[in-house]
Image (cartoon, rainbow, N blue to C red):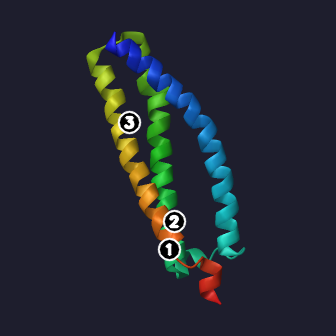
Amino acid sequence: MARASLIRIVGTMSRAAMVAIALVIATGLFNGWRGIGGSPSVLTMSTWGHALLLKLAFVAAALAFGALNRWSALPRLRRTASTVDAHTVVNIIRIEALAMIGVFVAAAVLSHSVPGMAAMD
């Protein structure tokens, strides 16, 4: 029963995350482009740029772990419903959550930093 609930909940979370990811990436690309002002050199020459690159690394890690869960661990859990596979899914979610904490910390730094192009003036 607990594994069936886990499968259902993780499946629902995964579908909802796909929509959220699309929106977050779209707004992130817009805000990032606006912040660098069309000059990629800002990314390496400012604290804001370093924080943005760090945030991108954490987002990429979270996406990779989410993809691993969605396309590997969760389908395996659906096939086997084994305890080991349930633990794998939960552990990947925990690692993904740690990456998301990194995203939030980097976002906090960004929100308290002068955008890259403004800092370069």
Q: Mark 3–mark 1 contact, CB under 8 Å?
A: no
Of circles 2 and 3, the one toward us is 3
Residue name at image x 53 percent, y 75 percent: 48
* Residue at figure coordinates x 32%, y 21% from the top left: 85
Residue depicted at 40% across the width and 16% down the height:
5
Disc 2 to disc 1, C-alpha distance: 15 Å
Q: Please name whichever residue, 77 or 21, is drawn nearer the observer in this view of the structure.
A: 21
Q: Quadrant of residue 30?
A: bottom right
* Three-letter code, disc 2: Leu
Residue 83 spot, x, y in % from top left: 27, 17
The vertical placement of 28 against 39, above or below, is above
- Are the two marked residues, 2 and 1, in contact with CB atoms closer than 8 angstroms? no
For marks 2 and 1, give the one nearer the viewer.
Answer: 1
Which residue in the protein does label 2 denote?
53
Q: Is residue 8 left or right of residue 80?
A: right
Of pointers 2 and 3, the one earlier in the residue sequence: 2
Residue bearing mark 3: 93
Where does the N terminus fall, quadrant-wise?
A: top left
Specify which label sits upstream in the sequence, 3 or 1: 3
Amino acid on which the number 1 mark rests in the picture? His
In this picture, residue 33 sits left or right of residue 115: right
Q: Earlier in the sequence, mark 2 or mark 1?
A: 2
**Closer to us: 11 or 69:** 11
Q: Secondary structure at mark 2?
A: helix
Residue placed under numbered mark 1 in the picture: 112
